[in-house]
Image (cartoon, rainbow, N blue to C red):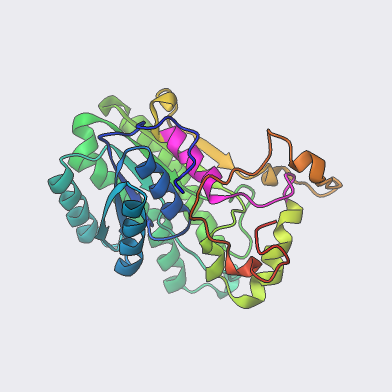
Amino acid sequence: MTYRSIFAPGLFAGRTIVVTGGGSGIGRCTAHELAALGARVVLVGRDEGKLEAVRQEIAQDGGEADWQACDIRQEAAVQQMVGAVVARHGRIDGLVNNAGGQYMTPLEKISAKGWEAVVNTNLTGGFLVARECYLQGMRAHGGAIVNIVADMWGSMPGMGHSGAARAGMVSFTETAALEWAASGVRVNAVAPGYIASSGMDHYPPEAGEMLRAMRATVPAGRFGTEAEVSAAIVFLLSPAASFVSGSVLRVDGARPQARMGWSMRLPGAEAQGRDAVRPYDGFHRAVTPRVFADQETGKPA
């Protein structure tokens, strides 16, 4: 089996695209789709074992990928990593700024160290990677950057450190789109909502019941798939989005529109099967999060 992308074969032939956080979840899925469309993908992350496993998957599927281990929170490490990519491939045409992470805790229990760790990963690290890709490559020849944020519209209770960092990344996206436009660089963001990805496996077991119940708060009545987020990223990297910059594309099934006082009417089986809203499962190597493994179907609802 191969990745079932809706985009034209060879769309990114000859292009080098960096994907941070490429060892798992949305980053892994996006790397697979980009490689299937002809890109030379550079996977970036801290876990060399995960990066190599994804590289092997892509190679087995006929794609081209390599990896660079890097802690994106360290400025010198980021500068060295981007320099190595440029030295090997000659240029960087696209960046998927996907690396991130957070943990669940109320604001009053977040220490300064915990706050800084999440902000450094989700905001500062993304800034450093984007800046270096611009300075060491895109300023000279142009390119496209897609920053991955989150469904933080209206707050992120229980993860306030992540919400603040993601909101900051949206502002950075808008500013970079303006400042770097003269160099032929587009900068956009994708904001995933509730996506059934391996990222859910990082939450504690006691969060399982809450995670499984979240689909009832989504007007679309389901979780999104990694492939649906990847498709949004690929569009923003593609020439079809050549007049799109400084924007945030939400992939969330209208979840932020849910309001108190509105009786949620979830789609029935008939509506869920209609073409316009049917789940898109293009990723042939998708893995069901463990939190859903004890469900009758073993798959995201």
- Number of disc labels: 0
Q: Magenta residues, as a range?
A: 218-236
Q: Is residue 26 magenta?
A: no
Residue 30 horizontal/vertical position (percent) = 43, 47
Q: Horizontal and vertical percent for residue 40?
A: 27, 43
Q: Position of residue 183 (x, y in %)?
A: 26, 28
Is residue 267 at least partly visible in the picture? no
Rendered view: 288 above or below 95: below
Residue 127 sits above or below residue 39 on the image? below
Residue 139 location, quadrant: top left
Viewer-proximal residue, 25 or 106?
Answer: 25
Q: Determine if the magenta segment contains residue 232.
A: yes
Q: Identify which residue is drawn at 47% across, 53% down.
A: 26
Q: Nearer the viewer, residue 179 or 205?
A: 205
Q: Residue 98 at what x, y percent from top left? A: 41, 52
Residue found 20% across the figure and 59% down from its top: 76
